[in-house]
Image (cartoon, rainbow, N blue to C red):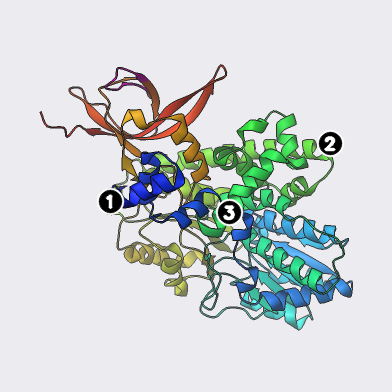
């Protein structure tokens, strides 16, 4: 999908150009993204951590803080209970670190995939036997009504710190801290759980200080590396508070890397100067996720919280091997699905629901995402666990997957998730009924999240300068909700060598690029390109490279 927003109200653009001292193209980019006044533009380009929202706007946060402080003062046994993905693991790590700074060591519990997402009653019973009296649920709990009631019967108080969509009937713990609650006043609704956890410790630090309990300063900025991993891993929109958290998180990782990140450098998995959104998305997050998918998520938790260099290196080696195993399992399943669907008439179907009892539970979420990317239809992939089926679903813009699945709850034993992703459990006998109902519930086509792009402005090659690239760095971090700017450019000639493109402009200068999507170079005549400029370095020299999203016919008059 291409969305073009290239208005040209000269007065506004001129005001931005002069007031900020930026190139005209930079001002046009701001305008295309709805930034039309100097104050908002300055806040975007020169953010400060003080711009973060007030954590006390989160619902129930005062109740959660009061009960947590009581448990700390009475030296009660606290357990941090988290989900097994990157968001859940980093959420547990953030609170675990904070308690450690206080000199308090909580228990941690991350269930295995076989236990399923969220709280489960056998785990609650086990924690009661261990003497836990305060259970803090991280990245889970919003749909665990029965499990929380069971914990209360055992005398365990529960604080939920989560971001998943609450059901109409939500649980009643001591505190239900979730920015998606209908009564939430928090400005950023789409926080990852690790973001909610960070705001919780911000508020907790303030409360401890005001009560005179905290006698020394705790620098929470260093926890932003973990917030960044979880936020990128959960693909939250990089806007509002999320953008601030991730922007300063990447800055912290570059300037003051912690033990876990130094292990990536020393093992030469990545290099210090290369930490950015790409490295997070395709190198760091997959390794953190892999542990919970095909091994044990406590492996990733130990890696992210260790302060011992040797342990960090050993754990990273294990995570590397786990990630390779995950890739192999995932690749085999995707290959099998592609073969099975090769002869299907998918044009007549609006959705894809697939089941195989032998598929690995830990990777079906990734597989569902790959199926959406390849076939452009909301997809649910299921496997068998115990006596029932479990599945993960992925969608795209045009469908709210959580609402769609919630409407089909009569066919399900359990469900949860958010707009773009869901998890379900159902009896095998209901699979056919659910598949039919899911297909009928899809009323519009979707745009897979990785395929959607917008065009920010028409530009000339003369405007592609180092000054512009410096400006683009200020717009970062790029990702969901804040994509890299795409420009329409009109080259004089285009030639290709496989996926690499050579371009000349009207001044006979040569530019190089690479095709990112499916597009064809016209055999005759000229064309326009949709491209994202990025900065590359070769032999110590920086140059502008063009990532080409599409090639369009030239519409210039003959």
Q: Where is residue 124 drawn, in percent x and y?
A: 75, 71
Residue at image coords 53%, 70%: 180
Q: Where is residue 421 drawn, in percent x and y?
A: 49, 58
Residue where numbered disc 3 is placed: 244
332 vs 351, left or right, is right
Where disc 2 sits, the SS reads helix
Q: Which residues make up the magenta segment?
A: 501-510
Residue where numbered disc 1 is placed: 9
Nearer mark to the viewer, of 3 and 2: 3
Which quarter of the picture shows residue 505?
A: top left
Q: Quadrant of the C terminus?
A: top left
Number of numbered markers: 3
Residues at discs 1 and 3 in contact (Cβ within 8 Å): no
How far apart, in angstroms, are the residues tagged by discs 1 and 3? 29 Å
Q: Residue furthest bottom?
A: 153
Where disc 1 sits, the SS reads loop
Q: Nearer the viewer, residue 371 or 26?
A: 26
Other-residue count near label 3 (Cα within 10 Å), few / some / many at <14 / 14–19 / ≥20:
many
Q: In the image, is residue 503 part of the stretch drawn in magenta?
A: yes
Other-residue count near label 1 (Cα within 10 Å), few / some / many at <14 / 14–19 / ≥20:
few
How far apart, in angstroms, are the residues tagged by discs 3 and 2? 32 Å
Image height of 539 relative to 418, above or below: above
Q: Earlier in the sequence, mark 1 or mark 2?
A: 1
């Amino acid at each position: 999908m291409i969305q073009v927003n290239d208005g040209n109200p000269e007065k506004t653009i001129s005001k931005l150009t002069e007031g900020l001292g930026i190139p005209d193209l930079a001002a046009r980019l701001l305008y295309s993204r709805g930034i039309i006044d100097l104050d908002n533009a300055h806040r975007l380009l020169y953010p400060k951590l003080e711009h973060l929202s007030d954590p006390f706007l989160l619902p129930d946060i005062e109740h959660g803080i009061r009960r947590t402080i009581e448990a700390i003062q009475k030296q009660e046994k606290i357990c941090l209970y988290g989900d097994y993905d990157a968001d859940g693991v980093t959420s547990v790590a953030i609170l675990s670190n904070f308690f450690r700074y206080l000199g308090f060591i909580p228990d941690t519990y991350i269930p295995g995939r076989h236990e399923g997402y969220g709280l489960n009653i056998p785990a609650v019973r086990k924690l009661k036997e261990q003497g836990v009296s305060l259970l803090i649920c991280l990245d889970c709990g919003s749909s665990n009504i029965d499990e929380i009631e069971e914990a209360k019967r055992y005398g365990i108080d529960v604080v939920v710190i989560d971001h998943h969509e609450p059901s109409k009937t939500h649980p009643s713990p001591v505190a239900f801290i979730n920015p998606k609650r209908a009564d939430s006043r928090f400005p950023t609704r789409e926080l990852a759980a690790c973001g909610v956890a960070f705001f919780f410790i911000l508020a907790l630090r303030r409360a401890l200080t005001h009560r005179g309990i905290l006698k020394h300063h705790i620098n929470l900025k260093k926890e932003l590396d973990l917030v960044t991993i979880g936020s990128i891993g959960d693909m939250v929109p990089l806007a509002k508070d999320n953008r601030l958290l991730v922007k300063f998180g990447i800055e912290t990782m570059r300037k003051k890397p912690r033990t876990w990140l130094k292990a990536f450098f020393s093992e030469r998995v990545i290099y210090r100067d290369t930490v950015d959104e790409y490295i997070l998305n395709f190198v760091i997050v997959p390794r953190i996720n892999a542990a919970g998918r095909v091994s044990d998520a406590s492996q990733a938790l130990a890696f992210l919280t260790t302060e011992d260099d040797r342990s960090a290196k050993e754990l990273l080696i294990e995570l590397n091997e786990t990630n390779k195993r995950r890739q192999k399992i995932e690749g085999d399943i995707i290959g099998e699905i592609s073969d099975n669907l090769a002869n299907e008439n998918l044009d007549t179907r609006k959705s894809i629901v697939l089941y195989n009892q032998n598929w690995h539970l830990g990777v079906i979420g990734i597989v569902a995402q790959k199926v959406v990317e390849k076939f452009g239809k909301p997809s649910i992939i299921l496997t068998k666990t115990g006596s029932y089926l479990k599945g993960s679903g992925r969608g795209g813009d045009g469908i709210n997957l959580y609402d769609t699945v919630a409407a089909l709850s009569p066919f399900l034993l359990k469900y949860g998730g958010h707009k773009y992703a869901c998890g379900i459990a159902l009896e095998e006998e209901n699979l056919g009924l659910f598949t039919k109902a899911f297909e009928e519930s899809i009323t519009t086509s979707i745009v897979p999240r990785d395929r959607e792009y917008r065009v920010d402005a028409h530009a000339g090659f003369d405007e592609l300068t180092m000054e512009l690239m410096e400006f683009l760095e200020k717009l970062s971090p790029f990702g969901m909700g804040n994509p890299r700017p795409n420009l329409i450019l009109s080259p004089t000639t285009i030639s290709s060598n496989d996926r690499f493109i050579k371009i000349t402009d009207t001044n006979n200068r040569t530019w190089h690029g690479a095709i990112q999507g499916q597009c064809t170079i016209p055999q005759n005549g000229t064309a326009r390109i949709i491209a994202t400029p990025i900065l590359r370095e070769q032999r110590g020299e920086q140059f502008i490279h063009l990532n080409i999203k599409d090639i369009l016919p030239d519409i210039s008059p003959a």
